[in-house]
Image: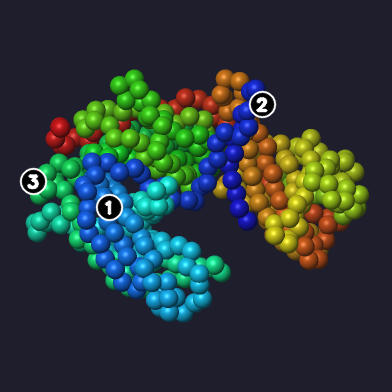
Amino acid sequence: MWTVVVVAALALGIAGALVFNQSSPPPPAAPFNEIEQSASATGQGVTIEALGASFSGTETILRLRLTVEDEKAILDQIGADGPVRRVLLSGTGYSGPFDGSPMTSAASRTGEVLVHLPPLRTNGTYDGTVELRISELSVQLGHGPGVLHGEWTLALKGPAVADAAQQLRVESLASPDLVVAGGRATITGVRSRSETRISISLPAGTLMLSQPLLEVDGDRLAPRSFNAEKGQAVASFPATGFGRPIVLRLGAIAVAGEGETTAFVLNIEELLWRVGEAGEFEIPAGVVLDGQQDLLLGGEQGKYGDRPWVGLAVRGNWHPANGQPMITDASGSAVELAHVQVGYQKDANGNILEGTTAIGFFVDGDVGLSRLTIVLGPRSAIDPASHSATLIPMPGQAGD
């Protein structure tokens, strides 16, 4: 079952404008103050070459190139048939002077790989060299993935010893708790020479409907990456000057009603026979055995692979993060969800308005469609207020 939040624009017929995937990691950032590299390592039929490296107090960005030198050696090691379509880095298959958090990577248009790592950790023995050891690669084959184990060691050039402290400098930011509909939100931040990273903790049942903006000296900055899940959000913005206060603007949020649920009881067995293969169809009043007919906007159906599903479009926004829909059939058996899509509308001024929720469920097997009970809740309401918080450097931090 998958979920998605969509904000769609109505004015001038503009299509959907924003999609949040609430579980994906943020993409790698662009290089900054890059140090040219010349290190390379070959093993198990693969050469890894370092092209550039960027270091700050919150992140490390590497530009690498992975080249397949011997396809047969790769296939022999993983015990699989070819062809080898691509070789990628593994999220945790590395070690070095970092904190061990998973790395993310993405291929660039030039065939290079842009890698996002935790910040470099230096100590009293740091001599300007950063040893990165890679122990695992992911191999994409014609019939699926494989894992290639080996040892590739890259002696990277790090910041000059005399410059390392300034290059890796960080500054913590704090703000008083922000009162929003639903309770208090906690906003904290950290800035480095490459980014300003803001962490947002929202009250239970409260969800962000648009990406936050950062205001610095009258200029507004959009996040370069944004990741939100279960009331916790992290936004990475371009770097801002050390010692300066910044203002975070949240935008519209959705707040779940307390303990509110809504239920429908439907008989769609004959209805599905009548509509045949129509992708969308109306829900006649006679189909609704119990529940608010005016909340049901229509039905739809389709397939995911070979599995048929049926869906309902419901007025209002019912976020699964605040309570998964529960569906049972005529025999009282649970029905498997196929998807939940929560959509919001925008007016001509860009204000976010209430929208609809599409709920799909699989109907293969022996699902009893003569009596479906669907329980939703709680329903979310929009708080359109302009919430903002000023973050300032925490005491005891030296100026730039």
**In the rendered image, which residue does mark 3 sit on?**
162
Q: Considering depth in this image, is 274 or 268 the residue closer to the camera?
A: 274
Q: Position of residue 339 (x, y in %)?
A: 66, 51
Sooner in the amino-acid sequence: mark 1 or mark 3: 1
Disc 3 residue type (three-letter)? Ala
- Residue drawn at (26%, 50%), measured in percent from left and top? 52
Q: Position of residue 111 (x, y in %)?
A: 40, 52
Residues at marks 2 and 1 touching, judged by CB atoms closer than 8 Å: no
Dot 1 lies on which element? strand
For the C terminus, the quadrant is top left
- Residue drawn at (73%, 61%), measured in percent from left and top? 307
- Residue drawn at (81%, 38%), measured in percent from left and top? 293
**In the rendered image, which residue does mark 2 sit on?**
13
**In the rendered image, which residue does mark 1 sit on?**
51
Q: Is residue 144 above or below residue 117?
A: below
Q: Is residue 323 above or below residue 131?
A: above
Sooner in the amino-acid sequence: mark 2 or mark 3: 2
Disc 1 residue type (three-letter)? Leu
Whole-Å distance between the Cαs marked 1 and 3? Answer: 23 Å
Disc 2 residue type (three-letter)? Gly
Between marks 2 and 1 in the image, the one whose residue lies nearer the viewer = 1
Whole-Å distance between the Cαs marked 2 and 1? Answer: 45 Å
Dot 2 lies on which element? helix
Q: Quadrant of residue 19?
A: top right
Dot 3 lies on which element? loop
